[in-house]
Image (tube, helix red, strand yellow):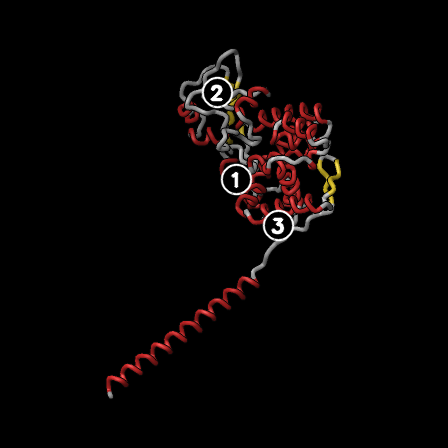
Amino acid sequence: MSNTFLRNKKHLLLSIWLLFGIHSGLQACQSSAEETDSAPTTQVEVPQSMVFCNEVIDLSRFDRRERLDRELLAFTYMHSTSIQMIKRANRYFPVIERILQDQGVPDDFKYLMVIESSVNPLARSGAGAAGLWQFMPTTAREFGLEVNNHVDERYHVEKSTAAACRYLKQAYARFGNWVSVAASYNAGQGRISREAERQYEENALDLHLVEETSRYVYRILAAKTLFANPQAFGFYLKAEELYPPIPFREIKVEETIEDLARFAKGRGINYALLQNMNPWIRSHSLPVHNHRTYFIRIPDAEGMHYNPKVTVPHDPRWVIDKWK
């Protein structure tokens, strides 16, 4: 009699425990679902058209609309990369824009640089492309950059930008429109020409290409949209969070420097800072041949310890502060 009672009691307690567990689990699931439902999401509206290099691009057709939508979503939800691009742009856009203007290349091509390197002068792809404009070694040399074990000008902001301008102007002479020029930066001029002829198409946006190239121009348009209104993507930056330009002085170099670390110490900095300011230097020495001349940048002491509170945004649209 007592054994039967104990067994029934155990069964009852087990049943109660199971029911409690199921009820708790259901409550947790419901709570999680409610949190998910209430979590804010950001969706940037896809415009009916956009202007790229003074050319109006119709985005009303379903395939174009959805391609741009994909890239807008990518910039929205790769938060850290998108935010860093805006921060770095405050330092590098003034330099890039000036060179593009001087070379007669449309300002919108700075957004091509954005998607190539995320505005990171040290960017390097698995395939070996390097720098802000992601030149491969052979192409870099073709357009006038020095690339060897000691010097790699793909990492030189000004020189690589000038080389990119030479490429872009050469491509424009071939295609006559900037959209095809942009697509060719990814696929190559020959590929765009062959596919246009094969598919009886003049507009590069209407070509059937490999996925990376098919996305390329839309990624540029998405980058332009991001920099025009970061808040629409959910990014609310203050001016003090942007990276200001670092003031520097230049030292003209016409003779070989055998020990760059010693050279740096003699100028009041260390080798790491020398590399940071001159990423085109790729070794611990700098040989000078064939009467070449180099200019090494030394950061100003005050500039190395800048006050973020006085940072001025290159574009007031990037920040939520009120700037006049």
Residue 229 screen position, x and y as percent: 66, 47
In this rendering, position of residue 8 left or right of residue 108:
left
Amino acid type, mark 1 = Tyr
Q: Is residue 240 visible from the viewing direction of this image?
A: yes
- Which residue, given by chain and number where applicable, does mark 3 sit on? 233
Q: Based on the displayed image, in which of its 4 quarters is residue 183 positioned?
A: top right
Q: Earlier in the sequence, mark 1 or mark 2?
A: 2
Which residue: 44% across, 18% down?
Answer: 257
Res. 306 mark: 1
- Which residue, given by chain and number where applicable, does mark 2 sit on? 148
Question: Neighbour class for label 1 at 10 Å: few (<14), some, many (≥20)?
Answer: some
Which residue: 59% across, 38% down?
Answer: 211
Residue 101 screen position, x and y as percent: 69, 29
Residue 25 screen position, x and y as percent: 44, 69
Q: Is residue 298 visible from the viewing direction of this image?
A: no
Which residue: 75% across, 39% down?
Answer: 56
* Vertical order, 117 against 267 (above or below): below
Q: Residue furthest top?
A: 290
Res. 61 mark: none
Amino acid type, mark 3 = Phe
Amino acid type, mark 2 = Asn
Q: CA distance from mark 2 to mark 3?
A: 41 Å
1 or 2: mark nearer the eye: 2
Q: CA distance from mark 3 to mark 1?
A: 29 Å
**Tags 3 and 1 touching, CB below 8 Å:** no
Q: Earlier in the sequence, mark 3 or mark 1?
A: 3
**Tags 1 and 2 touching, CB below 8 Å:** no
